[in-house]
Image: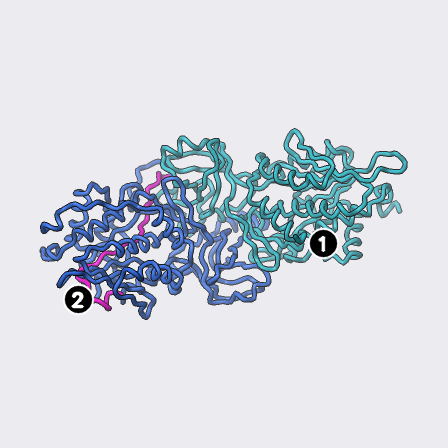
Chain colours: A blue, B cyan
Amino acid sequence: MNNTNDQLIDLPILTDEMIGLLETLSNIAGVSGNEIAVRSIIRDSIAGFVDELHTDALGNLIALKKAKVEKPLKVLIAAHMDEVGFMLVEKESDGIFRFKVIGGIDERALAGKPVQVGKKQKPGVIGACPVHLSTREERERILSVDTLRIDTGPGTSEIQPGEYATFATKFIRMGQSVCGKALDNRIGVATLIELIKNCPENIELIAAFTAQEEIGLRGATVAPFRYDPDVAFVIDCTPANDQPAWDQSENTHYKTKLNQGPAIYASDGRTMYDYRLIHFLTSLCENYAIPYQIRQPGPGGTDAGAIHLSKNGIPTASVSVPGRYAHTAAMIVRIADWEKHFQLMTAALAHLHADILKADR
Amino acid sequence: MEEKTKIKEFLCEIISLPGISGYETPVTNAIAKAWEPFVDEVKVSKIGNLYGIKRGSPSKDGKPNKRLMLAVHMDGIGMVIAKISGELLYFAPIGGFDPRILPGQFVNIHSQKGDFPGIIVQLAPNLLSESYEGKPVPLDQLVIDTGLEEKMVKETFRVGDIISYANLPQELPTDCIAGHSLDNRASVAAVTQCLTELQHMRHSWDVFAVGTTQEETAFLGGATSPFDILPDLAIVIDVTFAKGPGADGWRTVALESGVSIGYGANLHPMLFAEIKQLCEQLDIPYTLSPQPLMSGTDADPIQITGAGVPTILLSIPLRYMHTPVEIISIKDVMRTGHLMAEFIARLSPDFIEKIVWEDEQ
């Protein structure tokens, strides 16, 4: 570390304003391929803080905040703004639509849920056969998406196939946690908005709010090409399957745990992460006494899977907020984990310098 | 305000209150408040049945008025904490439902410390007794996550605490409502509409509007309230299966198709004929609801109370019964209420004597 970078900074706290922003972001709809509503909130939040702002061909919103020094380090931070959801694909009868799932939603968590359809978030439901009319044998099979329908009520002629839909979950606080339908990854979006506002002057920040992560990292595949980042950080959410097992046996496959701070990736299904950056991040956590965890290596991944392969290669790190029940109607995240994640990313920008990447790889 | 709007608002109010079988008090109080202006007396029985008593005009011959009972069950299905394991709550059902609708459902847990939100979730496959890949996770392995940490969970919840659905009513176009507990609060609204209309009508019978308890578990209210009231005639109002995704066939009727009139051993055939004729006369849309055996409503116990009670069953079509996204049409609620008021206004003091079995005519 050089001298200016050695000084520990004051870490920010998570404000009610940020939680309020997360609430707004989680409640609006932004299914992969239809991120417009999310993008426009982000644009309004950051327009006054950046030097350039573009929406590209896939719908990525990419902001550039220039440094106030010569030849600055160019840092890409990516957070996907899309969420899993549904598309109505066929009108079967008055107000009743066949639909398909967009992104990885477990079919077993669909039936009996309120949903909201289209730009105006019109109410609808995913119904299910009354228990009185089904047989025990039928109830042993899953209610697959092919047998379920979205019902918007009779007389909804303005709703047509092609509309997107999401669960109708409203964001709530639950004690030490927050709960919402799209915390994955509006938490990352809210964090990146704050990081832009407070970015150190020696960094050129490329903030990419990516589209279509949930359907194959498609936004992140093209996002790095507009500018020329030296290094990239991906901020996202990752599963915490840390609950006790049915038989009380030791839970060895938890991926991450709640209350253990940000999850730093060593490897996942798509990426072997740059160990220079892993070391940089873990050292920061130790210097600042920020709790952290290494996400258990295994399947899954983030936008890093596309970004680290971009152009002639980009050294990349992923730091996620652990959370439960992503890709369902209700994800739960501990507020403390989000705050520690936000603090680590703030510290990372404050201490990042080109020398880190001069070490061997 | 238009009567329909008033009833819609009342219905949305009472489906936003918990009223699980055996724990009906919150909803009982709201219904009592709504009935109070329309009746001479409101009472609650020793097991929780609600009686709204509207006296008829005094008879000319000094004989006591005949008694009509309008029975609607007020309770709804729910759950109860069965086991607490770390941060997680395991639960048992109250009433019958298909566990496949549960994962992702928002609930309220009514603890001695107050009401707390939670979500029903299925854990990761490695935490279950078997992976249940491609199969529904059984009810006894689904859990509730409250977002609270273990210590607080231990301090807050007890085995036996009651759990109700938390999703709020959704207003659909053309006067439809989606929500939980529309079975049977929609019928409560119909009785309320009947009492409203009776304000402007003369009637010679005493009308006992009865909100019964624990229909979903043991027919407690239906079995006991006739002993308090000693009715000469009973109308049971409940919901019936509306056609929709997953529900077709002879046990279903169309949503918005008006009152469904029960027919079969559980109901009095001559009264069935009277009601049908009145629908024709008043141009109220109706369907027939064949009940080859028991109707599975409060009519089952009421009919066999004491020396036997001639019983009518009126049903409101409802989609997705015993899910939290049931749908009804307010039009059907209004029609059912209107039909009952018109029927009551036409009841002569000797109506029952005039009801003669076909073979005795």
- Identify the residue at horizontal 31%, vertical 69% (top origin): A56
Q: Tell me where residue B15 appears, x and y as whole percent.
A: 57, 45
- Identify the residue at horizontal 42%, vertical 54% (top origin): A27
Say which element carries label 1. strand
Q: Which residue is mark 2?
A: A312
Q: List the single residue furthest toward the right.
A: B61
Q: Tell me where residue B14 appears, x and y as whole percent.
A: 59, 44
Give me the chain letter of mark 1. B
Q: Which amino acid, by three-letter code, is at mark 1?
A: Leu
Asked whether, in this view, residue A280 is left or right of residue A45, the answer is left
Say which element carries label 2. loop
Give whichever of A223, B22 is nearer the camera. Answer: A223
Give me the chain letter of mark 2. A
Q: Which amino acid, by three-letter code, is at mark 2?
A: Asn
Q: List the single residue furthest toward the top.
A: B46
Mark 2 burial class by Cα count in 10 Å: few <14, some 14-19, many 20+: few
Mark 1 burial class by Cα count in 10 Å: few <14, some 14-19, many 20+: some
Q: Is residue A300 visible?
A: no
Question: In which image quadrant can residue B243 be found?
Answer: bottom right
Q: Which residues are magenta?
A: A223-245
Q: Nearer the viewer, mark 1 or mark 2?
A: 2
Q: Is residue B19 visible?
A: yes
Question: In which image quadrant can residue A354 be found?
Answer: bottom left
Tell me whether circle 1 and circle 2 mark residues in contact (CB < 8 Å): no
- Name the disc covering residue B288, or none: 1
Asked whether, in this view, residue A215 is left or right of residue B176, the answer is left
Q: Tell me where residue A19 appears, x and y as whole percent.
A: 36, 48
Q: Tell me where residue A2 appears, x and y as whole percent.
A: 9, 51
* Real-space CA distance between mark 1 and mark 2, rounded to the nearest whole angstrom: 73 Å
Give whichever of A199, A175 is nearer the camera. Answer: A199
